[in-house]
Image (tube, rainbow, N blue to C red):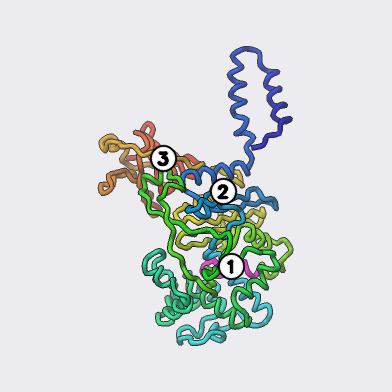
Amino acid sequence: MVVRKSVVWSFVTGVLRRLTYKADMRTLLAVLLALPLAAQTIPDRLDEYLTARTRLGQFSGAVLVAHEGKVLLRKGYGYANLEHLVPVTPETKFEIASLTKAFTAFAVHDLARQQKLKLDDPFCHYFDGCPDAWKAITIAQLIHHTSGIPDYEENLEMGSEKYYSALAHDDSAKTNIEWARTKPLDFAPGTKFKYSNTAYLILGFLIERVSGKSYEDFLRERIFTPLKMTSTMHIDRTRVQRNRAEAYTHQAPLYDVVGGIELTSDHLRRVPELRQLPPQADGGLLSTIDDLHQWTRALLGDGTLDAAFVRELLTPNQPGGYASGWLINKRFERDRITHTGVLPGMVSEIDLYPHSQTIVILLSNLDRIRIANIMRDLTSIVFGMPYDVARAHKVSHIDAAHAAKYLGTYKLDDGRVMEIKHDAENGRLEASVKDQFVAGLLPESETLYYAPMWEGTISFVNGALIMRQAGKDIRGERVK
């Protein structure tokens, strides 16, 4: 951390002029000890937060955060390859999973602007072998997940033996579409929203047929090269793709996880490789935080892309509120453009806040991270909102009779009602809020309990409780 000496000296000398008695030296000492915290910058806080997560084994990956046109953080954490202790850098390539969908949707819209297709056309005009149930489905309905075509990943249960077996073949994209052909639609096209990876597989083949080029070549020509995204490409297991991160997962016991486990402690294992040969248009791209920064800057209006075209891409569809490869919603009462990507051993997310030109890009090669909480907290740091830095939680043994005095109903300051009960099956307390959550509580002391579900705590004080969540304390008074 860098603190301007002139600012610090001016502050300290001002305090010194006011010191009259020896006892005031204690005040000066307190002031000096507080200086580093007071002078901590947003980049410092972002780095401190991610470093703490990494030290506890809760993160490995690369992050880029930008705000109002300025990059605040661009850094790698953890290891791209644990076996050889190769560190993650900003140049490390990650499998970006469903972040691929935004590029696929862009390509289809681009073909429409070239008048090679119409988004309201039935997609079967450009795709052979459609069953009768598919013939009324439009290209736009594929893009917006309103087609009703079943999702092949839902059938396979991600991470299962069945999943790996189905995706280990070179022609898995085709075979997964073939599977969907034999199934009824989940609903009438255009009537509901349901996420469908199968729909985006179909769009990949449509792009190839209409453009006359391979999926990757078309994306390179129309997106990657114009935006100078030199490290973005389709996954290809048949050739060397340098600077790639390996994918890891773990099944470590909960008590070990909350206590913190170093990434190098041998609990992580590689996940089996998925073939994902082109066109895997639902999740087959590799990229870096730098390339995705180029991409997101263009979408937020740096002048590279036509503004009307971008508005078209980012206009949410109903039902569902899903635009073209992006979900449009709000967080912290700010408009947000977002998408996540999940594959075994790889998770990713991009959050964009257009009004403040805020960009948060996270790519990770560890699939057991709390990505939603991490993205929330990184954004909180940028916007000056409360958050907590991760710490180790040492679980203690507390006698059940002692814990029994906390059982009851508590009215929280925010109006919710929380029940504290005893979970007989697991032998521990649990906190629940109706229609929201049931969370197990792990004792750290006689009065402090950790809740892994929300990565916060509950402390019991004088017949009340204090719920700590995302940097905020919510008090609850016992009502029965």
Q: Nearer the observer, disc 3 or disc 2?
A: 3
Please determine whether, in this image, residue 391 is positioned above or below residue 178: above
Quadrant in which the C terminus is drawn:
top left
Q: Which residue is mark 2?
A: 378
| Residue 371 appears in the rendering | no
Circle 3 residues within 10 Å: few <14, some 14–19, many ≥20: some
Count of picture labels: 3
Looking at the rendered structure, the secondary structure element under dot 3 is loop
What percent of the width, then of the height, locates residue 274? Answer: 46, 68
Looking at the rendered structure, the secondary structure element under dot 1 is helix
| Residue 301 appears in the rendering | yes
The kind of residue on which mark 3 rests is: His
What percent of the width, then of the height, locates residue 400? Answer: 26, 38
Circle 1 residues within 10 Å: few <14, some 14–19, many ≥20: many
Q: Tell whether label 2 touches label 3 (CB within 8 Å).
A: no
Between 85 and 472, which is closer to the camera in this rendering? 85
Find the magenta span and give its range.
Answer: 311-323
Quadrant in which the N terminus is drawn:
top right
Q: Which label's residue is closer to the chain start, 3 or 1? A: 1
Circle 2 residues within 10 Å: few <14, some 14–19, many ≥20: many
What percent of the width, then of the height, locates residue 249? Answer: 43, 56
Q: Which label's residue is closer to the chain start, 2 or 1? A: 1
Magenta: main secondary structure equals: loop
Please determine whether, in this image, residue 343 is positioned above or below residue 204: above
Disc assigned to residue 393: 3
**Residue at the image point whose x is 34% and y is 37% from the top:** 396
